[in-house]
Image (spheres, rainbow, N blue to C red):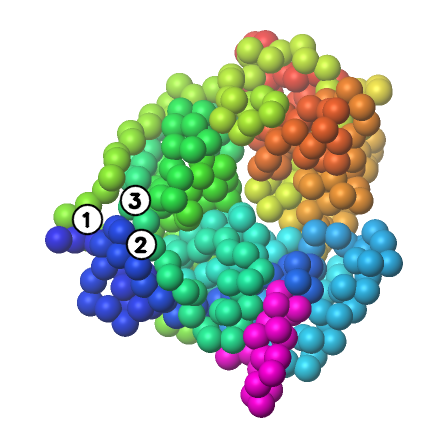
Amino acid sequence: MGMTVAEKILARASGLASVKAGDVVEPKVDLAMSHENAALVVNQFLEVYQGTPLPPNIWDPSKVSIIFDHRIPAESAKTATNQKKVREFVEAQGIGKFHDIRGDVGGICHQILPENGYVRPGFVVVGTDSHTTSHGALGAFAFGIGATEMASVWALGTSLNVEVPPTIKVNVKGRFKKFVGPKDLILHLIGRISAQGANFKVIEFHGQTIRSMSTSGRLVICNMSVEAGATAGIVPADKETIRYLREEAGVKGKIEVVLPDRDAVYEQVIDLDVTKLDPQIACPHTVDNVKPVAALKGTRVHQVVIGSCTNGRLDDLAIAASIMKGKKVAENTRMLVFPASGRIYTQALAKGYIGIFMKAGAVVMNPGCGPCLGIHEGALGDGETALSTTNRNFKGRMGNPNSQVFLCSPAVAAASALKGFITSPRKGAN
């Protein structure tokens, strides 16, 4: 019986010839990532060694990455102290894949890992962040875990008791209309199968539309696979994966592609055709409450946000800038832009996108998670509505349970910012 990509990766990492859905394995971890919540992991890790003569050493510092992105710059003395504690731990342990608050090499963890070549096809990647699923875009099996389990990974190098998940195969065909893209595809899929439709399963993406999609777009759909409940989202590695790793991430070593067997067993197969797909919006307060933009036209927007680990890459900013060039953000509407990394910020600056946004009246923020979680930047006021390219719109997201968050693509966000209400970027569509 053939294996899916996830099954093949977990079999290799567990030293087994084969595995199937439902088996319980202990795979070796190729990369373990944390952000500021590493402060909690450090506490748990040190507790593991209490009362033992063993020194508290990470099993392999070269396979650990820590990236500050959620609360940067620090919004409180407590956060700053926790960050200080993590810096001291990083230095003591010799962790090289550490990205502090810097304009040149900083940014959001789910962008930093791919653009630095830390993730490869066939890797088992764990992260103390639910959107670790992003890295399946590079053909890895990547999933989120808690702080206690991460402490065990740091100590042992394995992820304990992983049940091999069944896989849903999604075949995507057709060519996107102008101003329709990966974000609309994944919102449509989540709306179709629901926020629980892929619970504890893997979504494996196939089809000509996926094969012709950039790595940036693949990161979008894998990032949001978790919003359908998926343990992981995976795009099997191909020529585009290798191109990205070689040309953009600077990887020089061997790259091994992991593909599913022809007779791989899937729990479900879903076929999608994007040819007639229109821009999509997820309405409050669930990501699967998805409707075409036309159904929401005219909805007042107080704040528009473009960026995040979902849609803060260069092509996202390029699309928004092309729509906004020479125009102004509507009166009484705020627009925030936060690139996914320092590298992207620099590239966008060189291409003139940052200038376009600022001349339009937008506020360009430092790379980081910022408004997405609303802890210290971009919080909403009572009764306000935000339109955002981020990945979650739960009640209380962006810092206020008395507000509303709609999710959309960069094109829809940019067009709506100019009007002050939800609108389609496609002429004649409203």
Q: Earlier in the sequence, mark 3 or mark 1?
A: 3
Q: Secondary structure at mark 1?
A: loop
Q: Secondary structure at mark 2?
A: loop
Who's the residue at 49% across and 37% down the image?
A: 227
Where are the magenta residues, as a range? 41-60
Which of the two residues, 400 or 173, is positioned nearer the viewer here?
A: 400
- Magenta stretch encompasses residue 391: no
Who's the residue at 74% across and 39% down the image?
A: 374
- Amino acid bearing label 2: Val
Who's the residue at 45% across and 73% down the image?
A: 157
Identify the residue under disc 1. Answer: 264
Who's the residue at 43% across and 33% down the image?
A: 196
Residue 244 visible to an observer of this rendering = yes
| Residue 409 location (% of width, % of height) | 58, 30
Task: Quadrant for residue 213, please give it.
Answer: top left
Q: Are marks 3 and 1 in contact (CB under 8 Å)?
A: yes
Identify the residue under disc 2. Answer: 164
Q: Secondary structure at mark 3?
A: strand
